[in-house]
Amino acid sequence: MTDNAPKKKEKKAKGTVFVRKEICKGCSYCIDFCPPRCLDFSPDFNAKGYHYPILSPPEGCTGCGLCGLYCPDFAIYGVKFKDVEKLKQDAADAA
Amino acid sequence: MSANPDVVMGVEVENPVMPYLRQDRLPHIWCPGCGIGTTVNCFARALTECGLDLDQTAIVSGIGCTGRVAGYLDLDSFHTTHGRAIPFATGLKVGNPDLKVVVYSGDGDLTAIGGNHFVHAARRNMDLLCICVNNFTYGMTGGQCTPTSPVGAKQTTMPYGNFEHPFNLPHLADACGAVYVARWTVYHVKQLTRAMKEGLNKKGFAFIEVLSPCPTLYSRRNRLGDGVDQVKYYKERSKINNDVDTKDLSLEFQGDITVGKFVDRERETWLDAMNNRFTSVIGDKYEPYGVTNGEK
């Protein structure tokens, strides 16, 4: 891990995920099938006692959204910063 | 939109599947690790991509865990009696040929109690998309043996392991005349979404079998681990082969799985066949049914 540390610092997140933790059931589909392997169980748990996913490390996220496609509970989805910028641009053009 | 919208870089974003779900019903009843939710996720994404009018799309499901799908999708939906999803869907389609009707049900509902209807809908080439979520067991009633349970699998009603030969569902659908037959697993989300999109745009009886884990009954009784362990098994042991003959498909207990799109052909649908027949016999006096307002 220490050898890779300088490389990882240069890495910048291309996207992020949003988790609706109250409907997550902690099945770990998103964690096990995340292509850059940047999701992990949160140390906290939700009202039902399930550990929901969090980004760890957040800079690894590419915003591919595969976690959202795998999630059986519709509790997580990913967004690409590039797409959000485009949305912002479109909204600005329309206004 | 929920009370606290997700904001990134000053822009509000939302889960793309949420507009297709009845959000007041979430969280759903399916167990942690169950794959049915993933298939619904793929179906909602297929709906966004297929370009169909959602007011003209109806979903029909039977009884069982997968039968609950109709209650969670924000479409015109119909939760029918056990095994009779296809007859209700057939009636819906024949009564209003403009509708795109989707049957979404489980293996026990579609192929055990509703097996007769399944065979005949495929034979008639009724214009339906039939999605069968196969979890090899009756989940809602306590893990009984279904016609798709593989040989050797332990079930509540087969404590020494199943000894009955299971159905090969793609082969059954193919032999009965379905025009589109595919099998995917919950691991193949991208391919499954594409197959559902193709099935929605296909005219005739399209059949998609989706293998899904049942962590609470099937996996636990057979000591196969959690839902995610089953999905990892699908990842390791499934082989994509689109050109294989459906009778050679493998699906043994924890063995190799053949997945892919096996059949994609054109055949006269039931309504077309009826119209053609009556036109040829009665002549110009017959007004073709379901064609005047644009049959789909």
Image: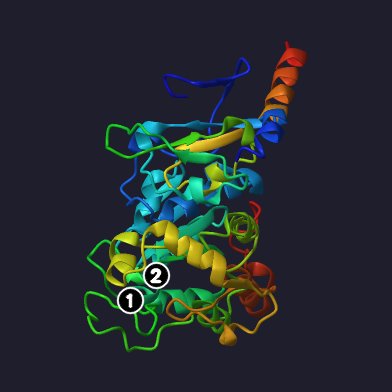
Residue B146, placed above or below residue A40: below
- Label 2 crowding class (10 Å Cα cut-off): few <14, some 14-19, many 20+? many
User: What colouring does the structure picture have?
Assistant: rainbow
Please name the amino acid that badge 1 sits on.
Thr
| Residue sitting at x 74%, y 24% | A86
| Residue sitting at x 67%, y 34% | A8
Q: Chain of mark 2?
A: B
| Residue sitting at x 54%, y 42% | A68
Mark 1 or mark 2, earlier in chain: 2
Residue B219 position within the rendered picture, expressed as x and y whole percent measured from the top left: 34, 66
Helix, strand or loop status at disc 1: loop
For the residues labelled 1 and 2, say whether their Cβ atoms are less than 8 Å apart.
yes
| Cα separation between marks 1 and 2 | 7 Å
- Specify the quadrant of the image occupied by residue A7: top right
- Specify the quadrant of the image occupied by residue A16: top right
| Residue sitting at x 62%, y 74% | B273
> Tag on residue B107?
2
Q: Is residue A55 left or right of residue B111?
A: right
Which residue sits furthest right? A93
Residue B67 position within the rendered picture, expressed as x and y whole percent measured from the top left: 35, 57
Please name the amino acid that badge 2 sits on.
Asp
Residue A91 position within the rendered picture, expressed as x and y whole percent measured from the top left: 71, 17
- Residue that numbered label 1 is attached to: B146
Q: Is residue B84 left or right of residue B11?
A: left
Residue A39, placed above or below residue B240: above
Q: Nearer the viewer, residue B208 or A64?
A: A64
Q: Chain of mark 1?
A: B
Q: Nearer the viewer, residue B287 or B267?
A: B267
Residue B163 in sight in this render: yes
Helix, strand or loop status at disc 2: helix
Residue A8, placed above or below residue B194: above
- Label 1 crowding class (10 Å Cα cut-off): few <14, some 14-19, many 20+? many
